């Protein structure tokens, strides 16, 4: 009976992931996964004897309520920190199971030590990621934290050996050390690398589930955990490739803005434009490509961007496309969610490979809140942190409109030559306000 | 440990590999939150062990594990549904 239900549950999960291959089928896919989880949880609850069953149901309801309230309060730009936190709770749950198992037997098994290690690292690392993404901590002493992590790492290894040999106190100490290690490990990692970190923690939480499955000999947990682990690992691979960074480099050499390089050009070398100029260029263009970055989402300009696209298409019959760099947001696919929120059709949205063939024929490129992902120095400057990172080749277009709050360099600390390109018009100011003004201008024209 | 467990592990890796590369980059964020939610399946481990738990401390630890897994499951599925609903809504208006 139980094994039949197991088959149904993992089949539903695998089908639900396959349905994410298209936006059309994805919503129902999620419902299938919910059904699978429902079957699994009810099956688990029914196997319990009476007083414990009640406790478990009450705990489940309280946790579930908190989860739903948390999700409701999360806005789409805040999505990455919510996902990081939930990831951490998954890891913590595995860690607690591992810990509780060691109390039943005189000597912990190797699996249990692994579960505690992976679970605690996932939990505390995710909490550190959450704090960084939510902007609650800002770290300057990265060097100190690296040395602390190294010391903690050695202590954790020793602690692991002691914990393996038995005493409960050592096991608890080991869990605490591991948690500290995860926290100090993730904290110094730079904001630009966050998509990589979130993906790898996502994968790790899956491998935790696999470890629990191996420990308690439950094939369902192994299958589902591996599926999640594969997902996180592949997303990590995609992200590191999109930034041309290695995972080890991300951990040990964070991108720190290099403040010593003075801006090579004084401010008068740039061509400043007004929203009126931008509106004029856009309405007379045949093809406009919009390149959004996280700065756009931070300014809350998604809805304005959606309106801009709508008015250009409907009133001026302009061919509008969106070009999205894989690391445009703070987590994989983040920018797509933000544009979806603003009702922008997925048919208008293109990835880096497709859109790079389109820039040559574009009349206007509207870069809003993006910087490093368009920087041509990635191709030429060998000592740059972004060297060989794939970029959106916006300089191929006829005109570039660059919306930016100031001329400060981006995360990578690299000046962007596009600012001084004679094809570029700089629109300095708030992304939302400027887009609004462009829309007002486009609406008032009666051409 | 039985050999079939290792077989399951290896085969799952292959399924995971092919299933995930099949997901469109458009939906990578929902993929993360859906996988996040289903990682709450670890709750089964806690429920399975709860039956055998005799001491207060292990029961407490396992109930805590259930609590955090529940946040993960409900929060993860809820936020995935919110995201995917937006993609679904748009698909309708444009066709």
Image: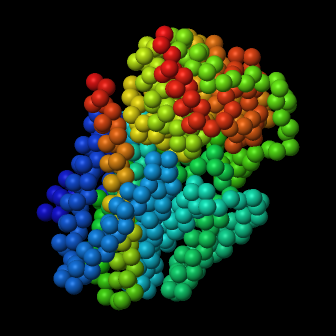
Residue A153 found in image quarter: bottom right
Relative placement, left or right, of A392 versus A45 is: right
**Residue under the point 49% across and 37% down:** A302
Q: Along the line of sight, which residue is nearer the eye, A301 or A215?
A: A301
Residue A72 in the image: state x and y as whole percent: 38, 56
Residue B95 found in image quarter: top left
Q: Is residue A404 visible?
A: yes
**Residue under the point 49% across and 33% down:** A304
Residue B82 in the image: state x and y as whole percent: 34, 48
Q: Is residue A415 above or below residue A158?
A: above
Can you name the residue that lies furthest to the left here? A1
Q: Is residue A20 visible?
A: no
Q: Along the line of sight, which residue is nearer the eye, A280 or A320?
A: A280
Instruction: Tell me the quarter of the image containing the N terminus of chain A.
Output: bottom left
Residue B17 in the image: state x and y as whole percent: 40, 42
Relative placement, left or right, of A77 versus A63 is: right
**Residue under the point 57% across and 20% down:** A279
Residue A204 in the image: state x and y as whole percent: 48, 57
Q: Is residue B69 above or below residue A447?
A: below
Relative placement, left or right, of A352 versus A310 is: right
């Amino acid at each position: 009976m139980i094994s039949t239900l197991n088959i149904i549950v993992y089949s539903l999960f695998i089908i639900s992931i396959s349905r994410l291959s298209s936006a059309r089928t994805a919503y129902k896919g999620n419902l299938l996964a919910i059904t699978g989880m429902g079957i699994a949880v009810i099956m688990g609850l029914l196997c319990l004897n009476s007083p414990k069953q009640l406790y478990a149901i009450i705990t489940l309801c309280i946790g579930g309520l908190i989860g739903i309230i948390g999700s409701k309060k999360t806005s789409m730009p805040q999505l990455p920190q919510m996902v990081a936190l939930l990831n951490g709770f998954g890891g913590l749950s595995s860690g607690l199971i591992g810990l509780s198992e060691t109390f039943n037997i005189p000597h912990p098994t190797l699996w249990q030590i692994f579960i505690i290690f992976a679970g605690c690292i996932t939990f505390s690392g995710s909490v550190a990621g959450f704090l960084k993404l939510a902007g609650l901590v800002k770290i300057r002493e990265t060097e100190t934290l690296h040395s602390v992590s190294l010391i903690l790492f050695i202590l954790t290894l020793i602690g692991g050996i002691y914990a393996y040999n038995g005493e409960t106190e050592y096991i608890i100490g080991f869990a605490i050390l591991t948690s500290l290690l995860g926290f100090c490990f993730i904290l110094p990692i730079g904001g630009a690398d966050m998509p990589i970190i979130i993906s790898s923690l996502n994968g790790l939480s899956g491998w935790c589930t696999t470890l629990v499955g191996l420990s308690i000999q439950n094939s369902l947990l192994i299958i589902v955990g591996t599926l999640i682990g594969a997902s996180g690992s592949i997303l990590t691979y995609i992200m590191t490739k999109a930034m041309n960074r290695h995972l080890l480099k991300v951990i040990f050499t964070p991108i720190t803005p290099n403040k010593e390089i003075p801006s090579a050009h004084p401010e008068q070398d740039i061509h400043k434009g007004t929203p009126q100029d931008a509106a004029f260029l856009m309405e007379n263009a045949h093809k406009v490509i919009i390149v959004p970055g996280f700065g756009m989402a931070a300014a809350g300009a998604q809805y304005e961007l959606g309106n801009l696209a709508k008015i250009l298409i409907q009133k001026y019959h302009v061919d509008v496309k969106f070009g999205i760099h894989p690391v445009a947001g703070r987590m994989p696919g983040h920018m797509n969610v933000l544009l979806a929120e603003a009702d922008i059709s997925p048919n208008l949205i293109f990835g880096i490979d497709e859109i790079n063939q389109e820039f040559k024929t574009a009349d206007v490129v509207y870069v809003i809140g993006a910087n490093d992902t368009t920087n041509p120095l990635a191709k030429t400057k060998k000592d740059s942190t972004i060297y060989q990172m794939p970029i959106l080749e916006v300089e191929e277009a006829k005109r570039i409109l660059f919306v930016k709050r100031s001329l400060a360099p981006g995360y990578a600390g690299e000046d962007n030559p596009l600012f001084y390109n004679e094809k570029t018009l700089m629109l300095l100011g708030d992304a939302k306000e400027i887009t609004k003004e462009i829309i007002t201008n486009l609406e008032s024209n009666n051409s | 440990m039985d050999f079939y467990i290792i077989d399951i592990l290896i085969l799952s890796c292959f399924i995971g590999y092919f299933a995930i590369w099949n997901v469109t980059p458009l939906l990578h964020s929902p993929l993360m939150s859906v996988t996040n939610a289903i990682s709450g399946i670890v709750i089964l481990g806690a429920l399975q062990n709860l039956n055998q738990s005799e001491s207060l401390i292990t029961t407490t630890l396992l109930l805590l594990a259930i609590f955090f897994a529940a946040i993960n499951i409900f929060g993860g599925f809820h936020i995935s549904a919110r995201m995917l609903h937006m993609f679904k809504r748009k698909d309708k208006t444009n066709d």
